[in-house]
Image (tube, rainbow, N blue to C red):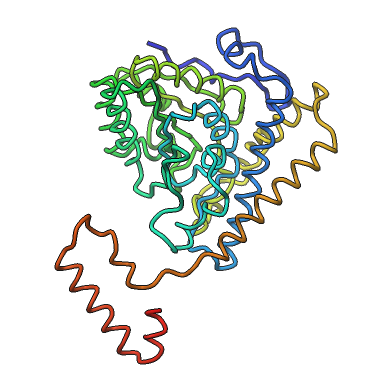
Amino acid sequence: MVEPTAYPVQLIQPDGRRVLDTGYAPLVADIGPDQLRELYRDMVVVRRLDSEATALQRQGELGLWAPLTGQEAAQVGSARALGPDDYAFTSYREHAVAWCRGVDPADMTRLWRGCALSGWDPRPVATTNPAIVVGAQGLHATGYAMGAKLDGADIATIAYFGDGATSQGDLSEALVFSVSWGAGVVFFCQNNQWAISVPTHVQSPVPLARRAAGFGMPAVQVDGNDVLAVLAVTRRAVRHAREGAGPFFVEALTYRMGPHTTSDDPTRYRAPADLEEWKARDPLDRVGRLLEREGHIDETFLDEVRAEADDAAARLRRGTLGMPEPEPATLFDHVYATGHPLVTEERAAHADYLASFGPAGEEARR
């Protein structure tokens, strides 16, 4: 059993200095200057995607968006620890995971614009679409891992969720089942300190990683704003799951710098001083300072990264604005796997309702 560490695993301090950790540093010994720059590039790109999507929502082009700013290291570090056959089950904030797994930015907002029931085909990228039901993805990941075990596949699944989801029954059921049946699931908790407006200490009097011991699984707490530490810890957890040793729990301590979603006003429940404290631990600045300290960053590289981020944001915007509006009748598609008389009746009633508006209704039907 791996006990939660007295202090979160950390390999890079906020000022960019490295931390000597003989247990976890060897797990990222292959991460040289080039790989570190790529991790930095990922984080810059996804923050730019996040700001673009937030702007689109404010401009009325998206119905909703769940910002990730502040959580880039937790998502990029963990996603880059996965193999191509490992399967990621996300909540609704893992836009950086989607980017790292190969999801086209043009597909990231389809669900949030209300143009489709999902954003992308999960099969080529081994990553699910956003799960709105809090904690449900833990059950999905456990079921998939159990199927993989029965098939003899040496893969891991990873379930992403926030601190608030640990208070949900679905997640507790997933933790119980995964231990009982030895399912290879990495339960990756992004503890961003707030379950909407409820602070973590109200949900649990002990660190969330310590809860895993009650279910009988190993757990590690990591500095979620340290991309190298997250990469190292997740590599260990994924290896544990792949080797058939059962589930593993990771608590990444991070902070949601923006609102819970674009319909939220965080100034109503958290103090400005808390935000400023966490801004000093910004995950992008931390890697940037390490690269600068070790002489692996210059303006040419930064310009290149900014250009790539702007290009990705432009793709996201073009994809969003270019999405075709769905026909109203498609609302009744895919409700059941086979035909159902009630759905047929409701489809006809809706068509009659639109027709009652005359030409305007016919236009809406098209």
Q: Residue drawn 39% across and 47% down?
A: 131
Image position, residue 41 (x, y; %): 69, 36
Residue 185 % position (x, y)? 36, 26
Query: Quadrant location of residue 4?
Result: top left
Horizontal and vertical percent position of residue 310:
71, 51
How far across and how far down the image is residue 267, in percent? Answer: 56, 53
Q: Which residue is rendered at x = 35% and y = 14% of the image?
A: 245
Name the image quarter holding the N terminus.
Answer: top left
Which quadrant does the C terminus fall into? bottom left
248 or 203: which is nearer to us? 248
| Left or right: residue 293 compared with residue 115 | right
Judge from the rendering whether residue 149 lies leftward or rightward of residue 222; answer left or right.
left
Outermost bottom residue = 358
Please indicate whether residue 101 sits to the left or right of residue 312 in the image: left
The image quarter in which residue 178 lies: top left
Residue found at the very far left of the displayed protein: 341
Which residue sits at x=32%, y=28%? 145
Which residue is located at x 43 percent, y 35 percent? 88
Work out whether residue 41 or residue 4 is closer to the camera in this orientation and state it: 41
| Count of picture labels | 0
**Relative to residue 150, is residue 64 depicted above or below?**
below
| Residue furthest to the right | 299
